[in-house]
Amino acid sequence: DTDRSRGLGDVYKRQVQAGAGMGLGHARTYLKGYLMAIEKTFIMIKPDAVRDRKIGEIVARIERSGLVIERMEMTTLERATVEEHYAHLADKPFFGGLCDFMTSGPVVKMVVSGLSAVAKMRTLMGATNPLDAAPGTIRGDFAVDVNANVIHGSDCLENAEIEIKRFFG
Ligand code: DAT
Ligand code: MG
């Protein structure tokens, strides 16, 4: 997986070199790309999508975006792990139902890497509430209910690191 990350960097370096002969506007675009970091984010296909046999379509969208799936495993989560993962929502009325849902069947957990992988995956996923998620996003296309919204993705780089440790050790 290190090799694949390095490969991505090389592609980008070539683009930056190609940008050296361009005008200022293009050069700035290339420089911005060069400064974007290759990140790792934690992604989980939730039990509703696994039950509905959407794993393949969701994985295809992630790969088609140019991001790289570095690790992937199907597992059924322990309730304690879910409670820790969603601790920021512990005082919400839906917390119990959320933990029931997340332990109701297997999930597919992943480490996904690439340029700005955290934000890129949030864009691919769409808004938390599928009613607000744009068509073309994973939640917009595969979910109708905030109680079963198909996919999890880390919301920032710091949480990505914490979540990768939590779910992959
Ligand atoms: P996200 O999953 O987009 O990061 P979050 O961290 O705020 O959103 O919430 C985690 C999950 O909790 C979310 O994916 C679905 C559930 N959830 C959030 N708000 C909810 C609500 N108002 N009613 C029911 N479930 C909700
Ligand atoms: Mg969240």
Image: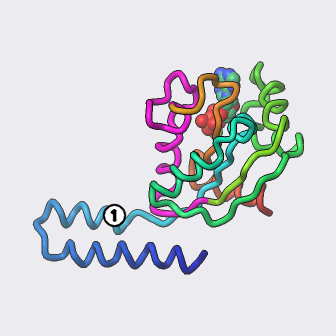
Residue at 65 percent across and 36 percent down: it is 150
Q: Is residue 87 above or below residue 40?
A: above
User: Where on the image, by quarter, is ligand 1?
Assistant: top right
Q: In this view, does 127 lie above or below 118?
A: above
Tell me if residue 83 can be seen: no
Residue at 69 percent across and 35 percent down: it is 52
Q: In this view, does 108 lie to the left or right of 41?
A: right
Q: How many marks?
A: 1
Q: In this view, does 157 lie above or below 135?
A: below
Q: Is residue 144 left or right of residue 93?
A: left
Mark 1 surroundings: few (<14), some (14-19) or many (≥20) residues within 10 A = some
> Does 134 appear in magenta?
yes
Q: Residue furthest left?
A: 23
Q: In this view, does 83 lie to the left or right of 163?
A: right
Residue 40 lies in what quarter of the image?
Answer: bottom right
Helix, strand or loop for disc 1 = helix
Image quadrant where one finds the N terminus: bottom right
Q: In this view, does 17 lie above or below 121?
A: below
For this rendering, which residue is in front, 65 or 156? 65
Q: Is residue 106 left or right of residue 64?
A: right
Residue at 59 percent across and 23 percent down: it is 144
Magenta residues (range): 112-140
Residue at 72 percent across and 34 percent down: it is 48
Residue 133 percent coordinates (x, y): 49, 29
Residue 159 percent coordinates (x, y): 65, 51
Residue 155 percent coordinates (x, y): 58, 45
Residue position for label 1? 33
Instruction: Respond yes or no on whether mark 1 lies under 8 Å from ligand 1.
Output: no
> Does 85 appear in magenta?
no
Residue 97 percent coordinates (x, y): 81, 25
Residue 35 lies in what quarter of the image?
Answer: bottom left
Q: What residue type is labelled 1?
A: Gly
